Image: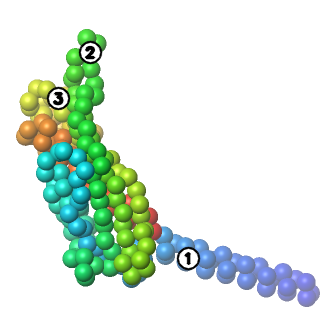
Amino acid sequence: MKIIESIIKFSVFWYISLVVSSCMFYSMAGSIPAHINSIAIPIVENQTAEFGMSESVTENLIEKFNEENILRVTDEDQATSILHATITKVTDAPYTFTKEEAVTEYRFTVNMKVEWYDVREDKVLIKKNFSGWGAYGLSGDISSDGIDNDNDGLIDGDDNNEFGDPREFATSAAVTKIAEDVLNEIMTSW
């Protein structure tokens, strides 16, 4: 009888331990450390010759964080975390060709290095490279170029946001993609 009681007690203890540890893991997964409630996003450093990229990327990052409202965007001296970013490379190169080797699509790609820093703990939480791209053709009209310019699975008439200057649109698509990826990385890394 004592053996059965011991087995039951052990089983109950084991079950409770499993449930408690599972709940602790679940509640911590996908959450930002409790002491971090704000983020500063200083102007992104641009190590390329591409004009206006620092401002464009910085504005997109701030906009995405404000839209999601997961961390309050504030000044560095008030922030509990800081997002440092550096644009390391920009390429604007041919991507697809016809059989005759004529260019049909260009790809504008932005590469960026990011560090998310915890001010209180004085440590880097995330250090990662990101890349985003946008595509454009030579037709001058992205609303009828047959290209999925922003990689959203929609082409031309089916995509209500494909309009404007082809290269500017590709640049905007690349910058928006990077901002979304950075935000998603911060939201899902904890």
First in sequence, mark 3 or 2: give its number: 2
Which amino acid is tagged 1? Cys
Answer few, some or many: residues within 10 Å of disc 3's Cα (few below 14, many 20 plus, some between 14 and 19).
many
**Is 52 placed left or right of 45 in the picture?**
left
168 vs 132, left or right, is: left
The image quadrant that residue 13 belongs to is: bottom right
- Residue placed under numbered mark 2 in the picture: 101
Q: Residue 23 got which mark?
A: 1
Image coloring type: rainbow
**Residue 176 can be seen in this image:** no
Q: CA distance from mark 3 to mark 2?
A: 14 Å
Could you tell me residue 155's position as x and y percent?
Answer: 20, 35
Indicate the quadrant containing the C terminus: top left, top right, bottom left or bottom right. bottom left
Q: Nearer the viewer, mark 1 or mark 2?
A: 2
Q: Which residue is mark 3?
A: 137
For marks 3 and 1, the one nearer the N-term is 1
Task: Identify the mark at residue 100; answer none if there is no mark.
Answer: none
Marks 1/2: CA–CA distance: 58 Å
Residue in the picture at 28% in, 25% down:
96
